[in-house]
Amino acid sequence: EYFISQLFLDNDYYYDFLDRAGRKGITVPICAGIMPVISANQLGTTVSLSGSSIPKAFSDLIAKYGDNADDMRKAGIDYAARQIIDLRQNGVKHIHLYCMNRPRMTAEILESIK
C-alpha cells in the first residue's frame, strides 16, 4: 500500500528517488523518512548503518555545534524541521519521522513546522 524511505539528509536524493520510482511505474505513496540527528556520535552510527551521505550543509552544522550537546540537539531538530517544510512545499504528503523513542523531540519538530 505504501513504502517508507530510508532516512536521508538531502531532500534532493528523495526527489530523485521519487522521479526514478515513477518512471519504473511505482504509484504507491513513498513516505519520506526523516530522522533528526541530534548528536555528532549518532551521525557516525546512522551513516555507517544506512549508507546515507552527508550533505555539506549538515557537515557544517556538525562542525559548528558538534561539541555542544544542547546546541547540536537544537540544530538537529531545526535541520529536520527545515527538511520537512521543504518536502511539504514540494508536494510531499507522506512523511515518516524516525523519532527513536524521543517524544519531546518529535513534539518540538511538529510545533516548529506548523
Image (spheres, rainbow, N blue to C red):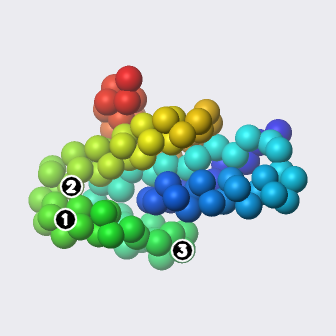
| Placement of the C terminus among the 4 image quadrants | top left
> Tag 1 or tag 2, which sits nearer the N-term?
1
The local secondary structure at tag 2 comes to helix
Tag shown at residue 51:
3
- Within 10 Å of disc 2 (Cα), the crowding (few <14, some 14-19, many 20+) is many
Which residue matches tag 1? 66
Along the line of sight, which residue is nearer the eye, 114 or 77?
114
Q: Amino acid at mark 2?
A: Met
Q: Amino acid at mark 3?
A: Gly
How far, Cα to Cα, is label 2 from label 1? 6 Å
Check whether the beta carbons of the residues at disc 1 and disc 3 lie within 8 A of each other: no
In the image, what residue occupies the spot 36% across and 56% down? 37
Residue 22, image x, y percentages:
78, 53
From this view, report whether residue 18 is shown above or below residue 57: above
Which residue matches tag 2? 72
| Residue 14 visible (yes or no) | yes
From this view, report whether residue 112 is shown above or below residue 3: above
